[in-house]
Amino acid sequence: MPRKRSGKRPVASAGAAQKGQVRIIGGERRGHRLHFVDHGGDLRPSSDRMRETLFNWLQFELPGLRVLDLFAGSGALGAEALSRGAREAVLVEKQRDRSADLNRQLTPLFEGRITVHCADALSWLPAQREPFDLVFIDPPYDLGLVTPACEALEAHGLLADGAIIYVESRRQGEVPAVPAHWLLSKEKSGGDIHARLYRRETGAV
């Protein structure tokens, strides 16, 4: 799952672009490869194994869910959720070229079920009105975006009752601060990644 900054890869020379791909590993589009261009080496690859673990956690929950991939990057999480039965996915990606690339590849693949927004995630959230059932929060490491994203989701009423929230962070970093009524359901570490799955307590205000 190619994602954001970790500092693990060398910075490319000016104007260089590294081409890569990520594979959808389950569901109706299993095996389909999404291609991306990584300008400057700032997308962070996670193993298929970690992504498979996440979707094994979610396998009985996904059908019919409305999903938000808040820091979309390569789009792997949103695409995987749709492939495995999610009703709808909204992807938010700040970088214009990546957003355009997501639109180009994913709109034909999941026609009518996916929307891609080119926007800063924290600026985009306050304008939304319809809640989500599942949210992926996997921002670039070390920018302090997890806690503000969690707070904004709650402040603007964007989580359905009993919503599921996936948070990915640096393994050796501080534990992300999340609302008290988000109950930790699953967690796993692998490489530099620590993955946590929360469920918003039913009836929480």
Image (cartoon, grey):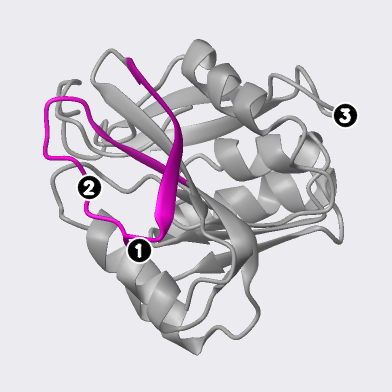
Residue 24, how many percent across, how many down? 68, 25
**Residue range (magenta):** 166-189
Instruction: Identify which residue is drawn at 75% across, 21% down.
Output: 26
Residue 174 magenta-highlighted = yes
Going from N to C along the chain, the mark reached first, 2 or 3, is: 3
The crowding category of the residue bearing disc 2, from other C-alpha atoms within 10 Å (few below 14, some 14 to 19, many at least 20), is some
Q: Residue furthest front?
A: 203
- Read off the residue under disc 1: 150
- Depth order, front residue of 31/168: 168
- Read off the residue under disc 3: 28
Considering the numbered disc 1 on the image, is that residue within a helix, a strand or a loop? Answer: helix
Disc marking residue 130: none
Circle 1 or circle 3, nearest the eye: 1
- Read off the residue under disc 2: 176
Circle 2 or circle 3, nearest the eye: 2
Instruction: Identify which residue is drawn at 78% across, 47% down.
Output: 86
| Residue 156 visible somewhere in the drawing | yes
Residue 88, how many percent across, how many down? 77, 58
Residue 169 magenta-highlighted = yes
Q: Do the residues labelled 2 and 1 touch (CB within 8 Å)?
A: yes
Going from N to C along the chain, the mark reached first, 1 or 3, is: 3
Considering the numbered disc 3 on the image, is that residue within a helix, a strand or a loop? Answer: loop
The answer to whether residue 106 is left or right of residue 43 is right
Amino acid type indicated by mark 1: Cys
The answer to whether residue 140 is left or right of residue 162 is left
Real-space CA distance between mark 2 and mark 1, rounded to the nearest whole angstrom: 10 Å
